[in-house]
Amino acid sequence: QKEVEQNSGPLSVPEGAIASLNCTYSDRVSQSFFWYRQYSGKSPELIMSIYSNGDKEDGRFTAQLNKASQYVSLLIRDSQPSDSATYLCAVINSNYQLIWGAGTKLIIKP
Amino acid sequence: NAGVTQTPKFQVLKTGQSMTLQCAQDMNHNSMYWYRQDPGMGLRLIYYSASEGTTDKGEVPNGYNVSRLNKREFSLRLESAAPSQTSVYFCASSEAGQASVADTQYFGPGTRLTVL
C-alpha cells in the first residue's frame, strides 16, 4: 500500500461545475497536508495547506480533512479551463517526511 | 527575485557519463531538496539539506551525490549515469529546517534528463 494514494484520472469536469479531488494516506499520525498544482511541463506550486479536521476555504478552493478516515480532499468551485492540471497531494508523516501522491490529472471541458 | 533556479533545463547523456545539476535560491531559505519525478510515480526525494553544511539521504539516493555549497546553492551529481536515471529533476527550497510541519516548498523549473 502506498503511503499517499490518489486516483490518477483523468477526471473530466464541465466548466462551471465543482471538481472534487481525493487523497488517502496510510500513516494515521500524519500531521500536515498540502495540495499542489502542476501544469504540464511545469513545476509544482502550492495551492493550499490544511492541518486540522474540517474545511479550509481560499477563494474557489476548499480543502477538507478527515483524520479519522485518513483522507483529504480538494474541491474547486466554478471550474475554469485554466484549472486543468495535475493536482498533487502531499502529507507530512509521523517521521516528518513529506510524502507525495502520484497526482490526479484534471481536465475542465469548456 | 528569481526564486529557485536550475541549470541546465535539458540534458542528454550517454550511459556512464557524469554531470552536475545546479540549483540556487534567493529567498534565504534554510532547507533545500532534490526530487525526481517519473510518470505515474509522483515526486521522490533524492537528497535534502536542512541547513548549510548538512545533507541527508531521501527515498532514492543511490547513484547520486549532493553538495550544499553555501546557503543559496545545492548541487546534484550523477557520477556514472544510467538509463534508469532518465527523469525530470526538481530542486526545491523551504524556509524552515526539515522538521517543520508547516513548511511550503518552492520548486525550480526542473531539468529534463535523458540517459541513452
Image (tube, coloured by chain):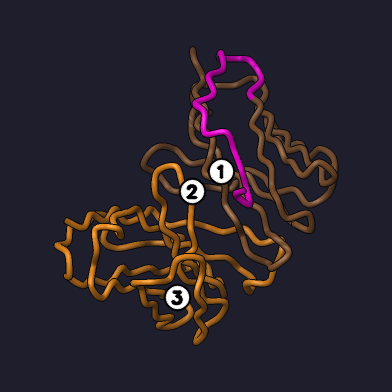
Instruction: Give the spatial CA distance, label 3 vs label 2.
Output: 26 Å
**Relative to B87, is A71 above or below?**
above
Classed neighbour count for the residue bearing mark 2: other residues with Cα under 10 Å, few (<14), some (14–19), many (≥20): some
- Circle number at residue B72: 3
Q: Is residue A105 left or right of residue A42?
A: right
Instruction: Give the spatial CA distance, label 2 vs label 1.
Output: 8 Å
Identify which amino acid the numbered label 3 is placed on: Arg
**SS for tag 1?**
strand
Q: Residue at x 61, y 68 (%)?
A: B95
Percent position (x, y) of residue B91? 43, 62
Q: Check if residue A8 falls in the magenta segment.
A: yes
**SS for tag 2?**
strand
Q: Colour of chain A?
A: brown
Percent position (x, y) of residue A94? 73, 64
Q: Residue at x 49, y 48 (%)?
A: B42
Pair 3/2: label in front: 2
What residue is shown with label 2?
B42
Q: Earlier in the sequence, mark 3 or mark 2?
A: 2
Q: Colour of chain B?
A: orange
- Range of residues picked out in magenta: A1-19
Q: Are marks 2 and 1 in contact (CB under 8 Å)?
A: yes
Classed neighbour count for the residue bearing mark 3: other residues with Cα under 10 Å, few (<14), some (14–19), many (≥20): some
Pointer 2 indicates a residue of which chain?
A: B
